[in-house]
């Protein structure tokens, strides 16, 4: 598949919402204690970066779509990120390193805003999400065969309940609710949708 860089491509329009700004993200994350989950044996530690800018549709996040060549989450929309490696100082360093490898992010361009709640996925990952601010997404795009596409997503899109599908998911006999968010020709779902929806809840 040809790599696509479509940060400013036309997609469903969302009006800016004054509740969702970089300053509010920083203040709300600073005021709360994130839920931290223990890491069971056999679970892989990972970190993702919620890279945010104040854009034309208000607060916007950079998302990627994984290629069909990767071993996990083929073709899925995701946040930049990946496994925490032994050389990483902490999970935030891992998220920044992975974002550099995947979309060419220079860590000196960002301001870290805070940590969200941990997530343990049904696919065996313990994920720590970190939010970070950047002035613009200029120059960011696929830098590895793991990523097919980079695009922006307005956080306020999630504030309309018609855009978020809450559906049951049964795996190995256990039922849980999974979020599905159609957006243009993209589909956000699973832990990526859950992390962004949680950020919206924190800010609302």
Image (spheres, helix red, strand yellow):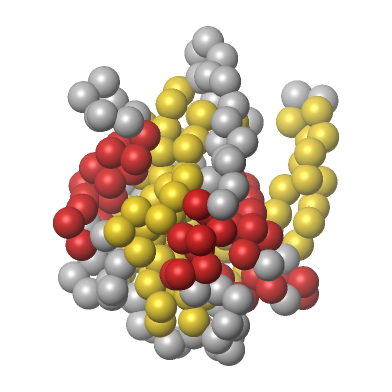
Residue 1 appears in the picture as rendered: no
Q: How many marks?
A: 0
Q: Residue at x 78, y 45 (%)?
A: 177
Q: How far across and how far down the image is residue 51, in percent?
A: 38, 60
Residue 176 appears in the picture as rendered: yes
In the depicted structure, whether residue 3 falls above or below residue 190: below
Q: Residue at x 77, y 74 (%)?
A: 162
Q: Which residue is drawn at 28% across and 46% down?
A: 96
Task: Classify the position of the C terminus by image quarter.
Answer: bottom right
Lateral position of residue 30 relative to residue 52, left or right: right
Residue situated in front as seen by the camera: 127 or 204: 204
Q: How far across and how far down the image is residue 17, in percent?
A: 59, 83
Lateral position of residue 44 relative to residue 180, left or right: left
Q: Which residue is drawn at 42% across and 33% down?
A: 46
Task: Classify the position of the N terminus by image quarter.
Answer: bottom left
In the depicted structure, whether residue 190 falls above or below residue 56: above
Residue situated in front as seen by the camera: 65 or 130: 130
Residue lying at the far top in this picture: please name it.
41
Q: In which quarter of the image is residue 140?
A: bottom left
């Amino acid at each position: 598949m040809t790599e696509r860089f479509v940060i400013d491509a036309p997609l469903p329009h969302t009006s800016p919402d004054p509740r969702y700004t970089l300053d509010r993200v920083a203040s709300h994350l600073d005021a709360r204690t994130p839920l931290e989950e223990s890491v069971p044996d056999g679970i892989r530690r990972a970190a993702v970066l919620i890279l945010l800018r104040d854009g034309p549709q208000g607060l916007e996040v950079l998302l990627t779509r994984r290629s069909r060549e990767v071993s996990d989450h083929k073709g899925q929309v995701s946040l930049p990120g990946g496994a925490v490696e032994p050389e990483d100082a902490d999970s935030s360093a891992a998220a920044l390193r992975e974002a550099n490898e995947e979309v060419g992010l220079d860590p000196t361009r960002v301001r870290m805003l805070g940590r969200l709640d941990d997530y343990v996925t049904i696919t065996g990952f313990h994920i720590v999400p970190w939010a970070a601010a950047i002035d613009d997404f200029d120059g960011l795009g696929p830098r590895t065969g793991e990523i097919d596409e980079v695009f922006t997503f307005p956080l306020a899109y999630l504030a309309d309940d018609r855009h978020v599908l809450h559906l049951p998911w049964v795996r190995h006999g256990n039922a849980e609710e999974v979020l599905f968010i159609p957006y243009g020709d993209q589909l956000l779902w699973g832990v990526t949708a859950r992390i962004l929806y949680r950020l919206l809840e924190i800010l609302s």
